[in-house]
Amino acid sequence: MKLPETVRIVEVGPRDGLQNEKKPASTATKLELIRRLAAAGLKTIEATAFVSPKWVPQMSDNAEVLAGALAIAAPGVHYPVLTPNLKGLEAALAAGAKEVAVFGAASEAFSQKNINCSIAESLARFGPVVETARAAGVKVRGYVSCVVACPYAGAVAPQAVAAVAAALFDMGCYEISLGDTIGVGTPGSIRRMLEAVAAHVPVSQLAGHYHDTCGMAIANIYASLDIGVAVFDAAVSGLGGCPYAAGASGNVATEDVVYLLEGLGIPTGVDLAALIDCSAWISAALGRPPGSRVAQARLGRSTLAG
Ligand code: HMG
Ligand code: MG
């Protein structure tokens, strides 16, 4: 097995991690989380989402969060944000965004529930977003949700994922993040999906975004490394979930990904001890124990009781 020499971690805790909290985290908590993540060595921190506040009220302080993150920006740290349409892009640009992401799905049912349009309509909507962002010198990432299965329609064919990934890539997205939104993938299904996508998009431009509902996310990352994927999305403490994917649990915990990669001798630039401190802090702020197995093991049982 030839593993990538380095791996980039995209920390999605402040966005994916906090978009589904019943009691929204305060703006101050979000900014302190972002500060601590940067101090722990994360270089890409997805800060917020410029989505409709009627759909996701948890992200309604998006402009304040992005502006606040940029004001305390650590050197070399990037703060991408989600932008589903031109309205979101314009607001993100006004708040200073230097990188944005559009998000589609490989399932028609999920596309309708999450962004209120068909896959074809979403791609038509993303075209001008990508064009306008790139004209402003802003990089655009593309997400594909439901790369293994959809919470409304069941199994999703690898070819359906490949078609949406290829469309986003051809449109000008520099990287395609493949989301196992409900965390049901296994190394086998993830491998089949990645092989289908890799026929259309270079592996070097792919990222894995694996939720951990079935406890397979770390195994899925290992399988993806074997194929050459070298970018993974993760959320500190395993925070996260999509408001339009009921029952799906959080993202793979960043601590667990760093632990895996350290064990494989792959540098991440992240200070695991500082990240575990950050995990303990945000978990306490949200009133729950850390969702990371590594953090639980390092922090001991006192935190588990908390
Ligand atoms: P819509 O209702 O069809 O939009 O929603 P619309 O264009 O008809 O506008 C309706 C209202 O929303 C209007 O306001 C607009 O101005 C406003 P009104 O006239 O009624 O007062 N509006 C906006 N306001 C602020 N920012 C905007 C915006 N756009 C319209 N950008 C829309 C369509 C896409 C906006 C909506 O469905 C939406 O915001 N969806 C976002 C859902 C979401 O954030 N889901 C979670 C993120 S995706 C995810 O978690 C998956 C991922 O992690 C990968 C994985 O795990 O698979 C990325
Ligand atoms: Mg997600």
Image (tube, rainbow, N blue to C red):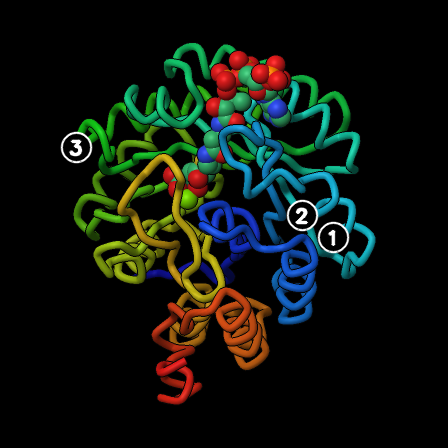
Relative placement, left or right, of 51 versus 76 is left
Q: Secondary structure at mark 2?
A: loop
Question: In the rendered image, which quarter contains the N terminus?
Answer: bottom left
Q: Secondary structure at mark 1?
A: helix
Tell me the kind of residue under disc 3: Ala
Q: Position of residue 73 (x, y in %)?
A: 78, 56
For the point 57% across and 27% down, the residue is 52
Q: Are marks 1 and 2 in contact (CB under 8 Å)?
A: yes
Tell me the kind of residue under disc 2: Tyr
Mark closer to the observer (1, 2): 1
Q: Earlier in the sequence, mark 3 or mark 2?
A: 2
Of all residues, the one furthest to the right in this rendering is 71
Q: Is mark 2 within 8 Å of ligand 1?
A: no
* Residue behind mark 2: 79
Query: Residue 11 lies in what quarter of the image?
Result: bottom right
* Residue behind mark 1: 69
Q: Earlier in the sequence, mark 1 or mark 3?
A: 1
Q: Is residue 52 above or below residue 15?
A: above
Q: Secondary structure at mark 3?
A: strand
Query: Residue 300 lies in what quarter of the image?
Result: bottom left
Q: Are marks 1 and 3 in contact (CB under 8 Å)?
A: no
Question: In the rendered image, which quarter contains the C terminus?
Answer: bottom left
For the point 51% across and 76% down, the residue is 280
Q: Earlier in the sequence, mark 1 or mark 2?
A: 1
Tell me the kind of residue under disc 1: Ala
